[in-house]
Amino acid sequence: MNKITIAIDGHSSCGKSTMARDLASRLGYVYVDSGAMYRAVTLYALRGGIAHDGQIDEPRLRDALPDISISFIFNPTTQRPDTYLNGELVEREIRSLQVSSCVSPVAALPFVRSAMVEQQRLMGEKGGIVMDGRDIGTTVFPNAELKVFVTASAEVRARRRYLELTAKGQQCDFADILRNVQERDYIDSHREVSPLRPAPDAVLLDNSDMTPAGQLEWLLHQVELKTNV
Ligand code: CDP
């Protein structure tokens, strides 16, 4: 079977990463979490005082970009790639609410986006990839054979994120998470460069009432439709 490129885009916290990772592992494809890249840039900016109190020092971040190296290494225990920032494992830190609160303004900066998109295209050069994010089907891989646009209600998404963080032992408040989900939706959909929207040829998936297993079956069926032509 020929290996295709699969783009999974959608709103924050709707389980894109889990579904993209499961799909990639079933197909023997590479999985790339593009959001982790924007999160790693944000962590770098927060640590270096380039971003604080909701302000981003854009010239400093632009100058720092060549010093930010992001890589992924497959973790056999979790069966998913871990994110490394300049060689340091940052998988846990990039998922914190502090990073989530600052990532969308960082990801809206055109120079950050162009640097990340360039790296993402290199990762997907040979096909056989599942990448999830906001602009994968519209900007990164506009020729992807399969594009999926996922959503679910904001409350369902905030509940999932809350359970994910508390399961990892992180203290959090549901109202803060819901607010963060809604704010990120707004910024992601209204930014000038690559705003979040479905590609015209994307298939839509509202997974509010779907189980992970049901969703994986649905996705595998979509892949079959694209590869058995
Ligand atoms: O896991 P969740 O869907 O909540 O977010 P994520 O995929 O980790 O992405 C974090 C943030 O990075 C998003 O809220 C977007 O602001 C930004 N992002 C983006 O602009 N473009 C992408 N391709 C991926 C993420």
Image (tube, helix red, strand yellow):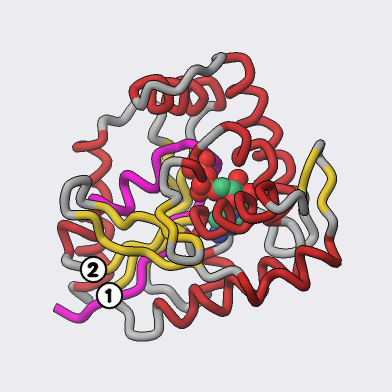
Residue linked to disc 1: 128
- As for residue 122 lying within the magenta part, the answer is no
Give the vertical position of 218 relative to 181 (above or below): below
User: In the displayed structure, does residue 159 sit left or right of residue 11?
Assistant: left
Q: Can see residue 147? A: no
- Is label 2 in contact with label 1 (beta carbons under 8 Å)? yes
Q: Nearer the viewer, residue 202 or 132?
A: 132
Give the vertical position of 177 relative to 215 (above or below): above
Q: In which quarter of the view is residue 63 placed?
A: bottom right
User: In the displayed structure, does residue 49 sit left or right of residue 38?
Assistant: right
Residue at the (66%, 48%) spot, across then down: 47
Residue 150 locus on image (x, y percent):
46, 45
Q: Earlier in the sequence, mark 2 or mark 1?
A: 2
Numbered marks: total: 2
- As for residue 9 lying within the magenta part, the answer is yes
User: In the displayed structure, does residue 114 sit left or right of residue 29?
Assistant: right
User: In the displayed structure, does residue 138 sit left or right of residue 89?
Assistant: right
Residue 184 locus on image (x, y percent):
66, 39
Pick the quarter of the image with the C terminus: bottom left
Residue 13 locus on image (x, y percent):
49, 36
Q: Can see residue 192? A: yes
> Disc 2 residue type?
Tyr
Q: Nearer the viewer, residue 123 or 70?
A: 70
Q: Report the span colored magenta.
A: 1-22
